[in-house]
Image (spheres, rainbow, N blue to C red):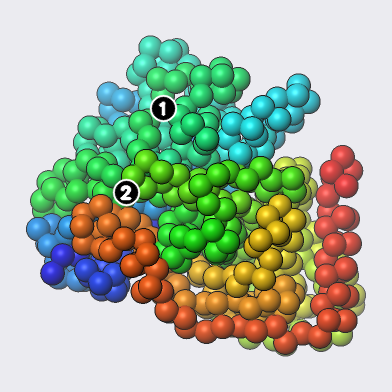
Amino acid sequence: MAHLIAIDQGTTSTRAIVFDDKLAPVATAQQELPQIYPQPGWVEHDAEAIWADVVATVRGAMAKAGVAAKDIAAIGITNQRETAIVWDRATGKPIHNAIVWQDRRTADVCAALRAAGHEEAVTGKTGLVLDPYFSATKIAWLLDNVPGAREKAARGALAFGTVDSFLLWRLTGGKAHLTDATNAARTLLFDIRNARWDDELARLFAVPPSLLPEVRDCAASFGETLPELFGGAIRVLGVAGDQQAATVGQGCFTPGMMKSTYGTGCFALLNTGTEPVRSRNRLLTTIAYQLDGKRTYALEGAIFIAGAAVQWLRDGLRFIKQASDVNALAQQADPAGQVYLVPAFVGLGAPYWDADARGALVGLTRNSGPAEIAQAALEAVGYQTRDLLEAMHADWPAASGTVLRVDGGMTASDVTMQFIADILGAAVDRPVVMETTALGAAYLAGHKAGVCPDPAGFSKTWRLDRRFEPAMDQATRTRKWAGWQDAVRRTLTPQQR
């Protein structure tokens, strides 16, 4: 039996999952990833810790599954997107901690570029907005703030990559400086229509093109692992950013299909087919996947804080001991209360794109306590999802009426999923396999290896666990939605209102 391994390197954890040739999970190993906060609004990761965790989890999952390297047909990698790592080509050592996608240190740079009138041209090529969320300004910050970095970059001594590229470099012993089209599309340096790095964008962001990896399909040859890592060389045949991997894992191969992933943040992608759709409502146009040189595009809405708000309840406020306790706590809330949490801890993403907004609790009374705040944290996920879907429907009316497929850690919360269905007034489908990000990565690798069927065949394997139907009356939905919109207006910075 040919097995597959998915490396799922996320914002708060790293895991490896062994799948069998029918894409059923066999064994999992996972490590939590510490967050580094040097200053308010700054978020970093230790790239060496990421690498160590990847090696440890792959070895652990293989040991649990009782498989050896010879039993593995291929590895697929999926990763937190936009997070920027720059390393020395000679040593493979990062020159600084990874700057995480949530990091806001380059907000002023992005604001200055917008003020100078560059956003229209940047969006036209990349489908993105000028925001510190994306990689380009992070790369420039590293080059300008690490002593000697820009000089080293000028002579080709440094390499840049998102997490997938860094892992490929390490896995192959420096033989592969590669990425895939979905990760490249999140850098602000990639022309998504022509599928190439853009020299004008590189000059605008002061990023030397010599830093950039070669871009390949999501299912392609990305090299072989060093034999000493896992007891033998294993081919790496699939790479995709986490949200695109989840889109694949959900079988969203038909235009109009939509998925939303609830992890640290929340990301909704709507498949729009082979032509990019330019958003008029501050959504992102991105590459959903690229297979056999053919790109499929998506509209994407990015929410920075979803499950991270539950972590805040646990670690910051200490209202709960473990994340799963939030459901029972939220259900104790006073039903007459109207508390709203706008979780702008690192700014607001789509469709507001307010990097300077900060979190707010609105509607507190003397009766408000941990239960009401817990309920507000869960409901914020639903409100933000509706923000995204309304923008998507306005940009692409054909999406109206589409059932939303959901995945990610938060989908285990029936309370949250039911509220999402209620506030949307639409059905929400939760699949049997909720870790669809890893599933998508495994499928891409397996498809390239000849182990898995074509996309149409893979789509037929999708199975429903539960459909959540809206149960909220329209008057309540309207009242609660109006309260959310008011809470967001109060949170936005004056220039964004």
Residue 428: give x, y in percent of width and height. 60, 76
Toward the viewer: 481 or 317?
481
Mark 1 element type: loop
Is 165 or 95 nearer to us in this picture?
Answer: 165
Say whether residue 489 is visible: yes
Residue 329 makes an appearance in the image:
no
Is 196 displayed left or right of 103 in the figure? left
Would you say 414 lies left or right of 357 here?
A: left
Which residue type does callout 2 highlight?
Answer: Ala
Q: Residue at the spot x=57%, y=23% of the render?
A: 201
Residue closest to the eye, 482 or 200: 200
Does 241 sit left or right of 352 as displayed? left
Q: How many marks?
A: 2
The quarter of the picture where residue 270 lies is bottom right
Above/below status of 174 relative to 343: above
Residue 39 on image: x %, y %: 64, 41
User: Nearer the viewer's eye, disc 1 or disc 2?
Assistant: 2
Left or right? Give the position of 401 relative to 116.
left
Looking at the rendered structure, which numbered label has been put on residue 219? 2
Other residues around mark 2 within 10 Å, as few (<14) / some (14–19) / many (≥20)? many
Find numbered disc 2 in the image and state the secondary structure of the residue it sits on: loop
